[in-house]
Image: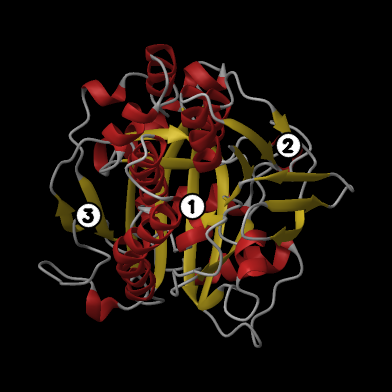
Amino acid sequence: MKVIISGAGIVGLLIAQNLKIRGIDYVILDRDTNENARGQGWGITLHWALQTFLDLLPSDVLREKVFKAQVFPDFDKKDTGTFKYINAANGETVVSIPPARRLRVRREEIRRILLTGLDVNWDCQTVKVEYTDIDVTVHCADGRSFTGDILFGCEGSDSVTRKILDPLEGSLARLPIRFVGSTCKMNKQEYDFVAAKYDPLLFQGTIPSTETFFWFSLLASPNYTKAENEYWCQVNLSWKCDFEKESFKTQEEIKECVIDRTRDISPDLKFLVNKMVSNDFENGAGLMKELKLADWPKVSWKGSDRILLAGDAAHAMTMYRGEAANHGITDVAVFFTLFDDFLNDRMAWSALSSTYHDMIHERCAPAVKLSHQACLDAHDMTKIFTNSSSPLLSSRKL
């Protein structure tokens, strides 16, 4: 058997590592020119799928490296696991979600860890897929083509494989929310203030007057920045938007809008917004960048036993519940539980493909809807209060 994996993100590489353990032939394709093409990237939180992720890693060496990829060294040893949501105008906590085990890690560092021992065909973007009842061929933009028994589409939210498999309904649905984020530098005094008053890792909130969502998360501490007094953080904002009326073309236009949206933010948080709009981070890393918020509520791709989807390609969702990576990891665990039955002649491939699809749909279709609603609720103060039933404020768990 030969498996083609389109996409060398966390999910695609985790699949490859587990195929390698089982001695299954595989080939990995990715559109990036090399493993460092994306730069630093942002952070992710591994929580309810953390143990599953660790169990899927092929060695203790890689497990140890994952813990070293935390945004703050050894933070798991003292982490309370509590998640706070605040009123971003006065800084008061609206809700505190009970403690849970978690790791806040740098996405690109986890990706580099998972690349250990794997070969990737870089600069190889999937543009066409042909399949029969017995095989599948992937054609790349640079003219290369690869034929195998199975294709795993793992290209992320805007998956090429998904849109090829489902040309009518495989595209993302955009939400009426504008999201702008930036990587900012902090000194130790500033970080210590935020950590003591709010949270040392991450917290979220809403500014009531403008119904603007605010998100802070630590990205790196001095052991990573290599500067004794330098921390990196993500500062993100989002708000309801009519894209036909509000269109950005320059950083200055984004800056003016961000300043207006945060006019009533707590004075204790204002300095973070100031950093965001006056950022001069080297090489453009700190520029304000817009993310297009979209999801794929269908979570169903039946059409060929030869093509499977995993991760964001299978269930693209917004980040307001912080579950996307956890669901992607769980996809991998589900697949290999079924795959081992297939390898031991306890399950036919057609049954594996169908069962895998149904299990992903059953778990993730509701999760996409919850994340969608959480995104909308983050910009509606009538949904933000103690004991609210909003998925924005409910526990992140299966």
Residue at 45% over, 75% down:
298
> Dot 2 corresponds to which residue?
37
In this rendering, the count of numbered labels is 3
Residues packed near mark 2 inside 10 Å, few (<14), some (14 to 19) or many (20 plus): few
Mark 1 touching mark 2, by CB under 8 A?
no
Q: CA distance from mark 2 to mark 3?
A: 34 Å
Residue located 76% across and 36% down the image: 122
* Residue drawn at the location 50% of the way across and 15% of the way down: 228
Residue 310 numbered mark, or none: 1
Is 38 on the left or on the right of 364, as rendered? right
What amino acid type is highlighted by mark number 2? Ala
Quarter of the rendering occupied by the C terminus? bottom left
Which of the numbered marks, if any, corresponds to residue 398?
3
Identify which amino acid the numbered label 1 is placed on. Ala
Farthest residue to the front: give it.
345
Residue placed at 49% from the left, 20% from the top? Answer: 222
Asked whether the viewer can see residue 7, the reply is no
- Compare marks 1 and 2 and give the one earlier in the sequence: 2
Left or right relative to 125: residue 171: left
* Marks 2 and 3, the one that precedes in the sequence: 2
Q: Residues within 10 Å of mark 3 (few under 14, many from 20)?
A: few
Q: Is residue 219 left or right of residue 386?
A: right
Residue 60 occupies quadrant? top left
